[in-house]
Image: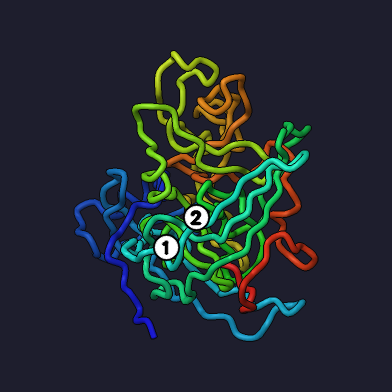
Amino acid sequence: MKKWLFAGLCSIAPLALAHVPESALEACQDLSNGASCAMELPNGRMSGRCRTLPQSHGLACVPERKSAARPTGSAAGGRPAARKHTVVQSDGLQHTVPATEAPITFSEVSISIQGPWRVIEANGISEHKTGTFPNRGNPHEIEVQRYRFRVPAIPQIAAQSTPVPLQDFGIGLNGVPFDPSAAEWYLGNRGRWRYEALSGAIQLGVDDNYAHVQPNGAYHYHGIPTGLLQRLGVSKERHSPLIGWAADGFPIYALYGYADGWEPESGIVAMKSSYQVKPGNRPKGSKEPGGYYDGTFVDDYQYVAGSGTLDECNGRMVRTPEFPQGTYAYFLTEDWPIIPRCYKGTPSEDFRRGPGNNQRERTAKRPARRL
């Protein structure tokens, strides 16, 4: 039986605590790290402790964390009850498990064009090292999968974008899926206040690749896939190579692209999301968390057109080494949303989770609670 592995590294979650109200900073003036503090917000008085925040914010008053209650019983339809979380402000730190474990077997990936489809078949095993699983934040072991995804070989931009539901956004060239969301909600209510996976509010046992494991043994990325990008040679000196395919068939790149997406001679720049943390305070009520917007929840962010280099789906029209004639393409970014949260085209039904979808097979039947 594997022992729990306590996280050896502590990483700053992208854009967590990007907006801190002045009252939170003022409450810790002349105080030390860990000291008790209190601040006045429009929706009431809030107490906590002074914490040193990332991104040079200095000391700020951060509400104390409360323990998450484990689920008991089942929700409607046989679905496990959601865990009850009460964290309102995160400290911006996501503890990661060192990626020191060799893959459990060889990575197997096949990508081919079959009629109108690009067919991706894989066993879900990376070539790079992973963290130790199970670990303290993730109780599942990595297992071989049997993936078969079809995406359009010639994708088209749709009349309107489609939000990414609780499913994989796409899949890497190494056969490991990109999964931006976590099924964790404030008070366990499956509604507006869903926790951002890498905000640090909920420790999910991710490794140095910002990946962990589903109950069915599927290893998947919640953030920048460090090991994959290293193997593909992603560098700030040149345009990102292709790193994967989205469910709608458009290509996925990471971090770096041309300053003018249509002009390879325009130089290389870091791609920047056009999302920002909302200013002000969240609503407060019996099912509302209150506190201030800081990136703890997905709904803490808003799209501000033109504030970055990418659109609302973290993509743009580009010419790339793989598509010299041009294409729409997605980019993974250091800042939120990291992995895109909407599709510009029409996503393949093969990525949909639920009864009747046999394109994504599992090797073992386990509880279906999603992480």
Q: How many residues crowd around disc 1 within 10 Å: few (fewer than 14), some, or many (20 or more)? A: many
Q: Whole-percent x and y of residue 222?
A: 50, 55
Residue 85 as seen in the image, left or right of residue 363? left
Q: CA distance from mark 1 to mark 2?
A: 8 Å
Secondary structure under the numbered disc 2 in the rendered image: loop
Badges 1 and 2: C-beta atoms under 8 Å apart? yes
Residue 60 as seen in the image, left or right of residue 341? left
- Sooner in the amino-acid sequence: mark 1 or mark 2: 1
Quarter of the image with the N terminus is bottom left
Judge whether residue 47 can be spotted in this image.
Answer: no
Which residue is disc 1 drawn over? 206
Q: Amino acid at mark 1?
A: Val
At horizontal 50% and vertical 18% (from top left) the residue drawn is 260
Q: Amino acid at mark 2?
A: His
At horizontal 46% and vertical 22% (from top left) the residue drawn is 258
User: In the rendered image of this protein, does residue 6 appear above or below residue 53?
Assistant: below
User: In the rendered image of this protein, does residue 137 appear above or below residue 167?
Assistant: below
Q: Whole-percent x and y of residue 31?
A: 21, 57
User: For residue 10, what is the image quadrant?
Assistant: bottom left
User: For residue 361, what is the image quadrant?
Assistant: bottom right
Residue 222 as seen in the image, left or right of residue 359? left
Q: Whole-percent x and y of residue 320?
A: 53, 25
Which residue is disc 2 drawn over? 222
At horizontal 37% and vertical 65% (from top left) the residue drawn is 131
Secondary structure under the numbered disc 1 in the rendered image: loop
Judge whether residue 313 can be spotted in this image.
Answer: yes
- Is 294 in front, or is 353? 353
Q: Whole-percent x and y of residue 72?
A: 60, 85
User: In the rendered image of this protein, does residue 38 appear above or below residue 19?
Assistant: below
